[in-house]
């Protein structure tokens, strides 16, 4: 089964794959390695058109980021 999650607001749209890919890109561009990702939590604030994310939450390697959509 293929599934896609979309978030839409005020003529803006983002899907789950784009959110995950963008979060991973921000993480690696900050000097981290993709292979070090053990968990990725994604939060969407549609009213602000923002995506917040936490890589490796609750560990010494925790990384927080955000981006607009």
Image (tube, rainbow, N blue to C red):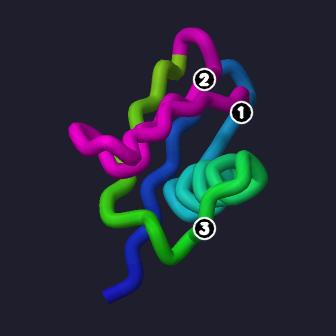
At 54% from the left edge and 57% from the top edge, which residue is drawn? 20
* Disc 1 + disc 2, Cβ < 8 Å: yes
Decide which of tag 1 and tag 2 comes sooner along the chain: 2
- The kind of secondary structure element at disc 3 is loop
The picture places residue 13, in percent across and down from the top left corner, at: 66, 40
Badge 1 marks a residue whose secondary structure is loop
Q: Is residue 23 left or right of residue 41?
A: right
Q: Nearer the viewer, residue 12 or 20?
A: 20
Q: Give the quarter of the image for residue 3.
A: bottom left
Q: Is residue 56 left or right of residue 6?
A: left
**What are the residue bounds of the magenta stretch?**
47-69
Residue that label 2 marks: 50
Density class for disc 2 (Cα within 10 Å; few <14, some 14-19, many ≥20) is some
Identify residue for label 3.
Answer: 33
* Other-residue count near label 1 (Cα within 10 Å), few / some / many at <14 / 14–19 / ≥20: some
Q: Position of residue 36 (x, y in %)?
A: 46, 68
Residue found farthest to the left: 58
Q: Is residue 34 above or below residue 10?
A: below
Cα–Cα span, label 3 and label 1: 24 Å
Q: Is residue 56 magenta?
A: yes
Of circles 3 and 1, which is in front?
3
- Give me the residue at 40% from left, 33% from top: 43
According to the picture, the residue beneath numbered tag 1 turns out to be 69
Measured in 3D between alpha carbons, the distance from the residue under mark 3 to the one under mark 2, in whole angstroms, is 24 Å
Of mark 3 and mark 2, the one earlier in the sequence is 3
């Amino acid at each position: 089964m293929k599934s896609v999650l979309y978030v839409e607001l005020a003529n803006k749209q983002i899907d789950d794959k784009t959110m995950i890919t963008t979060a991973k890109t921000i993480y690696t561009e900050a000097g981290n390695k993709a292979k070090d990702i053990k968990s990725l939590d994604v939060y969407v604030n549609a009213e602000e058109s923002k995506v917040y994310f936490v890589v490796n939450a609750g560990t010494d390697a925790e990384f927080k980021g955000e981006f607009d959509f």
